[in-house]
Image (cartoon, helix red, strand yellow):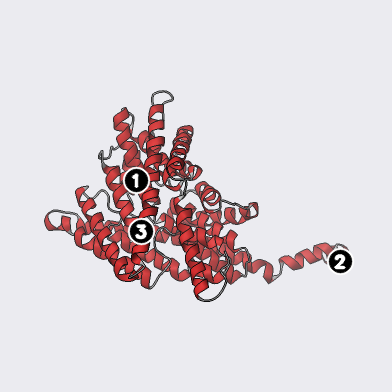
Amino acid sequence: MAGISRKYPMLRRSQAVWASRRVWQPRLVFWAGAVSIGLISVLFAMLADQALALFHLVTSGSGWRLYLPLIITPAGFVLCAWLAHSFFPGSQGSGIPQAIAARHLRDDEDRGHLLSLRLAAGKIALTVVGLFCGASIGREGPTVQVGASLMLQAARWGGMAQARGLILAGSAAGIAAAFNTPLAGIVFAIEEMGRAYESRTNGLVLTAVILAGLASLGLLGNYTYFGVARDTVAFAADWPLVLACGVIGGGLGALFSLLALRITRRIRRWNALQPLPRLLLVAAGCGLAVAAIGIASGGLTFGTGYTQARGAIEGAPLPAIFFVEKFAASLLSMVSGIPGGIFAPSLAVGAGLGSTLGLVFGAATGTAALLGMAGYFAGVVQAPMTAFVIILEMTGNHDNVIALMCAAVLGYGTARLISNEPLYHALSRVFVAEAIRRRRAEGEPARS
């Protein structure tokens, strides 16, 4: 071997490079970060499920226990909003806008206000508390911020310079591990997180998704998030339903996005004079309204909506106005200022809308729920590829690919007619603007 190295000096230099600590340390830290995203995502999912189960245990039964949410939910909203404002600023809301904003910021200190281990811990804890209080939120958006935070910290420890690519990779790994949907994680990274996607980040994204997915599979095994959908869209009979789910779902999704942006902007302006007192007042009011809606719906609108969406996909019709109630509860939870995502609640609203339209068109509930999810979700996030890929992977039914694609594209097209401002990207600009104001207040130029 020594003779070969003497004969071929290029081989000798290559061996020296690969044996160098500077080469292997960043790779090992990156791999460890990706695996940790998968493990923490699984832990987060378990904590979230336990918190929601505990809420239902405490508030189920008869008599006065049915009205406990009128105390627990607003009190929990106030607690989460206060903790987020006072101890974990930057943790409010979904977490996806923070990750998008961090990719646009060039200064590491500015990114640290949005992505850090401290924020990741706070995001997990406060989302779990919110679910224990019955908030209509999900853990998937927060998992994106957690994944991006972990990967950015790995970049600091490993001395890696590709911060923007690593944030993208951590976000994709978070989605992949949260739903057990590796393809959706990659599509999400391309379509939603990186509108100006760079091909050189392909390796980072793929590696992060694979390692996070393997860690998740090692703990939970291979599973489909909503089980396996059995119904298939009939070519002729169900196409009016496809059109209805796409157009109505996209319109309703755009309405959610439009209301969320306008309400949060008005609340932000109103809070400017007395930030904390008014913030807590908004949180209490939203929490009380969410509790009232939950009681009126028989408890169906509390939490993520996973159980209701899965039931609809498996063929159990939801109440006709469930989607309206869940829409309102999700909107109130989002504008309240507490940490929590809209992925799972949006899928539940879509499933409820599809279930209702299925009754109108005389179609199978499972088929209608899938189409409603695709149309509504594409309308909310304006990311049609992510919508149909994530629903396809979560239900394990590849017979409905064309129908889901059509519903998602129709939902996206309808949403663009109503609102041409994608929700996550519009919210991300708020965090970029805050970073610029903070820099100006400190007398330094902002770099974004």
Q: Is residue 37 visible?
A: no
Give the number of the mark in front: 2 or 3. 3
Amino acid type, callout 2: Arg
Image quadrant in which you'd find residue 159: bottom right
Separation of residues labelled 2 and 1 (CA atoms): 66 Å
Q: Which mark is residue 192?
A: none
SS at badge 3 = helix
Q: Residue at x 74, y 67 (%)?
A: 17
Residue 69, percent across and down? 21, 58
Image quadrant in which you'd find residue 233: top left
Q: Is residue 201 visible?
A: yes
Contact (CB < 8 A) between labels 2 and 3?
Answer: no
Q: Nearer the viewer, residue 382 or 386?
A: 382
Give the number of the mark in front: 3 or 1. 3
Q: Residue at x 49, y 71 (%)?
A: 438
Of callouts 3 and 1, which one flags the residue occurring earlier in the amino acid sequence?
3
Q: In the picture provided, is 193 more to the left or to the right than 162?
A: left
Q: Nearer the viewer, residue 217 or 158?
A: 158
Name the image quarter holding the C terminus.
bottom right
Q: Which mark is residue 266?
A: 3
Separation of residues labelled 2 and 3 (CA atoms): 72 Å
Residue 128, percent across and down? 34, 62
Q: Residue at x 36, y 38 (%)?
A: 369
Separation of residues labelled 3 and 1 (CA atoms): 27 Å
Residue carrying label 1:
348
Amino acid type, callout 3: Arg
Amino acid type, callout 1: Ala
Of callouts 2 and 1, which one flags the residue occurring earlier in the amino acid sequence?
2
Residue carrying label 2:
6
Q: Establish if 233 lies above or below 224.
A: above
| Residue lying furthest bottom | 442
